[in-house]
Image: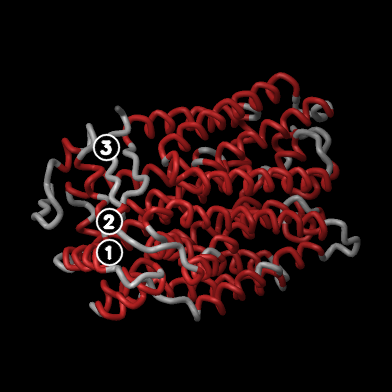
Amino acid sequence: MAGGFAVASEARYTGKVTTFVVLSCMMAAMGGVIFGYDIGISGGVTSMRPFLKKFFPKVYRRMEKDTKISNYCKFDSQLLTLFTSSLYLAGLVASFFASSTTKAYGRKPSIVIGGAAFLAGAALNGAALNIYMLIFGRVLLGVGVGFANQAVPLYLSEMAPPKYRGAFNNGFQLSVGIGALTANLINYGTVKIKQGYGWRISLSMAAVPASILTLGALFLPETPNSLIQRDQNHQQAKQMLQKIRGTSDVDTELHDLISASENSNTQQIPYNLILQRNYRPQLIMSIAIPFFQQVTGINVIAFYAPIVFWTIGFGESASLMSAVMTGVVGIATTLLSMVLVDRVGRRPLLITGGLLMFAAQMAVGGIMAAKLGDHGGLSKGYGDVVLVLIGVYVAGFGVSWGPLGWLIPSEIFPLEIRAAGQSVTVAINFLFTFLVGQTFLSMLCHFKAGIFFFFGGWVAVMTAFIYVLLPETKNVPIEQMDKVWRHHWFWNKIVGSEKPGQRRDAL
């Protein structure tokens, strides 16, 4: 079978889902809310006339007065895309600093730093008087999500009981969806403010989830994995395990954590270690999965949903409401993924979601190519069909690549390279989010409806990749994740049958 072999060893661990661990993970998942809020808010404000008139007057004039320019090209502006994508360039750089902080000082400090930086960026954006303040504020927001996105998925994976790790980690993507939906609802309200300052409210309201995250993170417990790795404090780690598992019988799990930590301490340079042959599968997945997540085109829809809907003929208010509707679909399907991920597994959800996204993108591209010209809009009937199809596309992403794009990289790394591996994942995610976001409006102008065929082609490639190369990781404890690679039909040719603790030779 293409999926290979999965190790079902969670039964070795005792314990239950406790209120303490649920509340801790809910607070940490606020890191996803700030990320989602920014994704939603940036797309909304860039379709608001007062915002465009103040900061992007060329785009504003093109929208209002230029009847000759194509529907697909009205928003084509490198400065406008820089407003959206500058955050992700800053996040790319910040993620590498976050790796060192997370490894040396723990997951909790990185979450606090992320919240504080995002809070400062929200204040600056809300008070922006010129484009320079606006972009600098976006850079601070990027530092915030760089730290949060590096630390929060690790925190959730390490705090969660192995049997329910998928559901807990999917809480990050659920929080992203909640943040994006909240932003879309706020945009829908603020666009109606006649005095023209609604965009300031939208941008400054990002301070609310950032404040909750920053203050709440001060009271978060550190993960047992981090306590053992940093301080070698086995007694404190045992007490924390007992508290989060709700049982005193945690010796088996504690032993596995200590063994993993001792193995990690034999190597002091994780970025060199991750390049070794024995970690080749994890390295490839840490690059491929975030890359594929971005070339689904989802963040294009998230960033520019109001602009896309405007392009096909929806009005300003209707465009924002359509973005709200797709946001609701995203949250609903992410909840469904949380229920299914630890029951049916990661691979079936990724493959099913990929097929849904591919079909929806091909259909949207076909309708727009056939029915939407350079001027005018789609008829109401075709516009509604496109809205439904985009909802299907968002549903496919919400049940698969949305949550699992963060879950799988956070669970496949052994402790010795976990912080470094997560940094690679976050950096690749931000790099391609930046590149796709920076080029999309230009691509829309030149490719027109073909942009949906472009992303649909990538979805076909990634679905085949998952079918052939990703082993199932359902119910496998993080400390024993190396076994899935050694039993996979392809990866065992690279890593061999080497057991944990044996010497790992570099190429």
Q: CA distance from mark 3 to mark 1?
A: 22 Å
Instruction: Give the structural element (helix, strand or loop) at label 3.
Output: loop
Q: Residue at x 55, y 40 (%)?
A: 397
Q: Position of residue 246 (x, y in %)?
A: 41, 70
- Colouring rule applied to residues: secondary structure
**Alpha carbon distance from label 3 to label 2:** 18 Å
Label 2 sits on residue: 12
Look at the image and tell me whether residue 306 can be seen. no
Q: Is residue 479 left or right of residue 94?
A: left
In the picture, residue 135 is in which quadrant? bottom right
First-in-chain label (1 vs 2): 2
Element at label 2? helix
Say what amino acid the circle numbered 3 marks: Phe
**Gap in Å between the C-alphas at discs 1 and 2?**
8 Å
Q: In x, y percent, where is residue 469?
A: 31, 34
Q: Position of residue 428 (x, y in %)?
A: 41, 51
Q: Nearer the viewer, mark 1 or mark 2?
A: 2
Tell which tag, 3 or 1, sits nearer the viewer: 1
Residue visible at 42% across and 56% down in the picture: 426
* Pointer 3 local density, CA inside 10 Å: few below 14, some 14–19, many at least 20: some
In the rendered image, the vertical position of residue 369 relative to residue 251, given as above or below:
above
Q: Name, please, the residue furthest toward the right.
A: 194
Quarter placement of the N terminus: top left
Residue at horizontal 33%, vertical 30%? 468
Q: Which mark is residue 5?
A: 3
**Residue 159, quarter of the rendered image:** bottom left
Which callout, 3 or 2, points to the residue nearer the camera? 2
